[in-house]
Image (cartoon, rainbow, N blue to C red):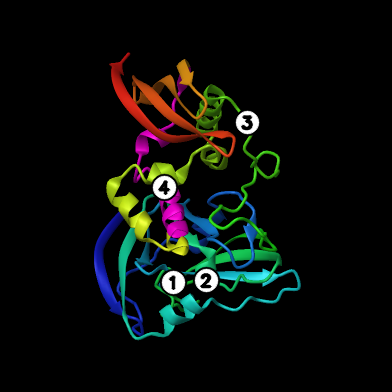
Amino acid sequence: MKPWNKCTLAASLFLFCISFSVKAQDIDFSIRYFEKRVYYAGQGPIFIQLTLTNKSASTYRFYLADERAFSIDFDVRTMTNRSLEPSEILIRKRTQNQQVFFREVLIQSGESFSFTEDLNEYAKLDQTGSYVVQARLYPQLYQTTSKVNNPVLESNRLALTLRPAPLAEPGKPAPSLDADTNAILVRQNLPPDQVIEYILTARQKGQWEKFFLYLDLEAMLSRDGVRKRQWMAESEEGRQKMLERYRSDLKNAIVDGDIATIPIEFAVERTNYGAEEGTVTVLEKFRYGTLVERKRYTYYVRRKDGIWVVVDYSVINLGTE
């Protein structure tokens, strides 16, 4: 996949400037939940990952707006086939007079291109119940689509269940689901070395919810002085947004990439802890092409509400083998 130069376009103009020679049936457009968790009506983001895969022998081209509302849409329906109303955010974005900034994206044969969107920005999800979610992509932008000259790409469907919002303690995140059992993940009173083994094993298996279970995201976020000052100045709502953003940045290796890197092997070397704080030293190995790199991690843990959680870490590079 290769992006071309960024362009601008008035939202009302019709596009004829490029040719889309690849047939729509040769493009696989799929969606899935970015993370599997319990979702509550009117609360928190619902991140959907959208992926386009080019199954043809030719290069596929389409326009992707910087403001994704001009490239994609979500059709969310009840079990009685009633379509949900669009969100106020979506209506505001599409009705205001503005320029639409976009780029032309090229997906080579056999390649895929993915991005993530919050479903709450497209539909009103303030009522409990069961729903069916389908995404639509407009290769020549939302306002300019013609089903004759520019067919809309439609994705697979996802089942969505919104539960009543729990009467939880303010500031605590919504419960997450175990992808294997669908049970709600609950922290256990594990010793520090087992906490680290749990986290690293979860990362090896790509189980993000288990990986985050024993991370104190507030403490991790506050390791950076700038973020800490911002945290102290934020309201409770602002702090929750910071935690969600930090969580997302960790997944995408934008921040603290060392802790999210997947080890091919690991071994706990030493564990020291007292009543409230401790450290766990782990030798981890990572594969980079034909080389295997060795690193020594020290995880700093703290007892919080009777549970050991990770609050910080450091890394020493030991070279390759």
Q: Nearer the viewer, mark 1 or mark 4?
A: 1
Look at label 4 and name its amino acid.
Glu
Q: Quarter holding the C terminus?
A: top left
Mark 2 or mark 3: which comes first in sequence? 2
Look at label 1 and name its amino acid.
Ala
C-alpha separation, residue under disc 3 versus residue under disc 1: 44 Å
Query: Which image quadrant is residue 21 in?
Result: bottom left
Which residue does the image show at 49% across and 71% down from the upper left? 151
Toward the viewer: 215 or 229? 229
Q: Nearer the viewer, mark 3 or mark 4?
A: 3
The number of discs equals: 4
To which residue does mark 1 refer? 69
To which residue does mark 3 refer? 189
C-alpha separation, residue under disc 3 versus residue under disc 4: 44 Å
To which residue does mark 4 refer? 111
274 vs 33: above or below:
above
Which range is magenta? 239-267
Q: Position of residue 236 (x, y in %)?
A: 47, 61
To which residue does mark 2 refer? 122
C-alpha separation, residue under disc 4 versus residue under disc 2: 27 Å
Which residue does the image show at 56% across and 58% down from the upper left? 170
Mark 3 or mark 4: which comes first in sequence? 4
Which residue does the image show at 58% across and 64% down from the upper left? 43
C-alpha separation, residue under disc 2 versus residue under disc 3: 40 Å
Q: Position of residue 155 (x, y in %)?
A: 56, 61
Look at label 2 and name its amino acid.
Tyr
Marks 1,2: beta carbons within 8 A: yes
